[in-house]
Amino acid sequence: MNQLKKYGAIGGAIALALCWPLAVGQIGQNVVTDGINQLNSGSVTAEIVKYDRGYLSSEVQTRYVVTDPEMAEMLAADGLPNQFVVNSHVSHGLLSLKAHSVLDDVDELPVTLDTVTQLNGNTDFTLTFDAWHQATDDVDGAMVSISRSVLQGHATVLGEITYDLTVPSVEVDFNSGEKLLLSALKGSGQGRMSNGLWLGEQMMRFGDVSISSTDQVTMFGMKNAQYEFSSLVEETTQRVSSQHVFSVEDLVTTEGTVDKLLVDVELGNLDSESFEHLLNLYQSNPVLTEEDVESAIPYVETLVEKGFYLSMNKMALTLGDNGEFESQWKITLPEGTDNITQNPAMLLPALTGQLDTFFSNELVEQYPFIKQGVDEAIVMEFVEQTDKGYQINAELKEGNLLFKSGQEIPLMALLISGAMQP
């Protein structure tokens, strides 16, 4: 009897081993089907054309159609179709599926995707874009060259994504004579999409960027530029906050050169439901109709009533030798401002905030137009002179900017003056 049990156990194990690839294939098909269904959106539709499941592997063909009119128009302008068919060879492993995917009959786009998907749906992916070169002959056309680029990362069934992007170089030579050069592009991110809003962190870094005119004069250039974005939703209050940080070591424009630049902006404490609805409304309808505006009013009311803030955590730049400028400010719309669409005049008096700005002596001396403005502001007691430079401190209260000297300027007057500038 014991021998029979032993032989039965061995036979059962062998049968399970023989059947397991079939089970993995079935589980894999369910995973792929669910994944394709989740890709459908207002911009892209996805479908499985065929799924030939075998014992140790499967052949899968999927179709993706770009339905967004603007995106489809951009593809057409580059001579590319608005729909793509992808052929995938899927291998059935013990605990995962490996897939190698290529575009069907689109030789002009050398893209391959390799994935390893666990049976729970979590996926490691590597998207490779081989060296690519394309030229268009019309007047508005260009010759584009992109070096071999790689995007790799991990995606979970909960929608969480981590990724790293590497693009060594991009060169665009326009037929009109201008040129765009980009080198050492690196990107990374960690987070998830929620109702059209990215929650998490993203970073993009550029080694060099330059745009040259027809006579090869640099119209715009950057070195070691970096952009960082982060956002989150506070679980207890359901408030959204996002931060944008841009920095660059050398910035060249036709107006002059900036040695260092840092801009750190934060938008926070927004009601998540209202903000996400308005964001989705704009993304779905870039040109808003009267009906769209009407439907947005209740969400704008709620957004304002619950309050939020806009903060320039830091803006700093260096021009020439020790020419320094630095500014911080924060504007808050407190909770409780209601019926704003019926009475917009209530908005400015409700705002509160702080302003702190510094100009170094060297900066003021280098630029006469800055010196003239600072001298006038000193006479009007808006600016305080220190040993290192000039300081502006003001508080925003009841629709007025209150300066440290006691002077006061209505915020409305500043807005009207700024709007009337040529």
Image: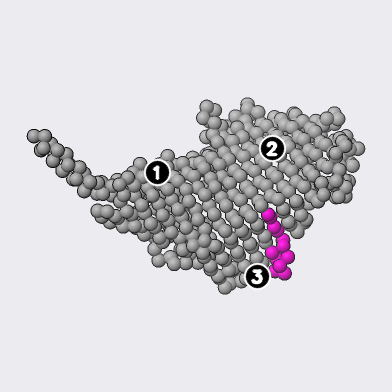
Residue under label 3, please give it.
Answer: 176
Of labels 1 and 2, the one closer to you: 1
Which percent across, then down, holds residue 359? Answer: 82, 42
The residue positioned 59% from the left and 35% from the top of the image is 241
Work out whether residue 74 or residue 103 is closer to the camera in this orientation and state it: 103
Q: Quadrant of residue 345 in the image?
A: top right
Measured in 3D between alpha carbons, the distance from the residue under mark 1 to the one under mark 2, in whole angstroms, is 38 Å
Q: In the displayed structure, does residue 12 sit left or right of residue 378?
A: left
Amino acid carrying mark 3 in the image? Ser
The label on residue 313 is 2
- Secondary structure, mark 2, is strand
Does the magenta-highlighted stretch encompass residue 218?
yes
Q: Over which residues does the magenta segment extend?
A: 212-223
Measured in 3D between alpha carbons, the distance from the residue under mark 3 to the one under mark 1, in whole angstroms, is 47 Å
Amino acid carrying mark 2 in the image? Asn
- Secondary structure, mark 3, is loop
